[in-house]
Image (tube, grey):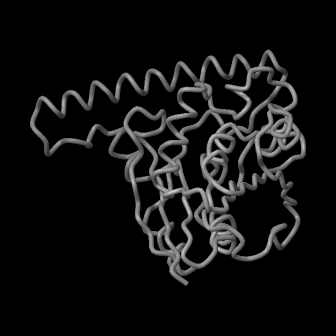
Amino acid sequence: MQWTEFFGALAEREPDDEFATGRPGGLSPDLADRIADDIAQKLELNPDDTLLDYGSGPGVITRRLAQRVARTTASDTPISILERGRTAGGEIDWVELDPGATDPPWTTGSFTKVLSYNNARTYSTHQELRGPIDTLCAAVAPGGTVLFGDIPDRERTGQWESGERGRDENRTVWIGRLERRALDMERDARNMTEFMARLQRLGIEPPKEFGERHPGFMRDVVTRIFRENGGEVSVVTQPLDFPNAHTCVDYVVRFQH
């Protein structure tokens, strides 16, 4: 099963909204609120903004952000995801993406703020990332900002798994980081086991890559792609209490022209 089919099946069969996004540990209202607050701060959302959430899923985060801006567009595929999003309500324009189309279903430079969150893990190579990044950059208006968020990071993943993170700090802090790493890895393994059992009960077979840890993307490559599109890039870590904080980063990209 491909990623699009997987998320479509979740939208159709998963009764619990916390798990319809495909996040193994679920997306509780509290976590969704915290993620939305973090995104709003990094994007510097204001009431006059027009926001595009590219790859929005059923809109759990989108609905929280829509309350902070003038107009919100959520886009994803297949249609079952959008239907679930519409049913949940919110002042949002829902736009279906056509995987076979060469042009997006909106005008170039239509949005002051553009978001893509927790989508990059469905891609395996840097070359595969280029298309989505180009789309994000084309959608943002001059002077606007793109947030490419929750991106598996090769450097951060390697440090976390090897225990290298914090080695230059004092022993107490380093040991504390190692203990936190062990707790988070145990949590991740438990969440994945429980979620796989949930999928089996629903009769959904995930893509083979779903249960594997993503090796992460190289910051220099991702940054270069954004710069080639005219963006000024800042790489920002996520709050430590986020589920993927130990392996992921956010890219905040500003466009002056």
From the viewer's perspective, is 176 left or right of 83? left
Q: Toward which corner of the image does residue 80 lie, by quadrant?
A: top right
Residue 79 or 224: which is nearer the viewer? Answer: 79
Placement of the N terminus among the 4 image quadrants: top right
Q: Is residue 217 above or below residue 144?
A: above
From the viewer's perspective, is 94 left or right of 50? right
Placement of the C terminus among the 4 image quadrants: bottom right
Q: Position of residue 215 (x, y in %)?
A: 50, 48
Q: Is residue 122 above or below residue 239?
A: below
User: Residue shown at 53%/76% (left/top)?
Assistant: 255
Residue 111 or 227: which is nearer the viewer? Answer: 111
From the viewer's perspective, is 43 left or right of 22? left
User: Residue shown at 41%/65% (left/top)?
Assistant: 234
User: Residue shown at 39%/40% (left/top)?
Assistant: 239
Q: Position of residue 66 (x, y in %)?
A: 67, 47
User: Residue shown at 47%/22% (left/top)?
Assistant: 187
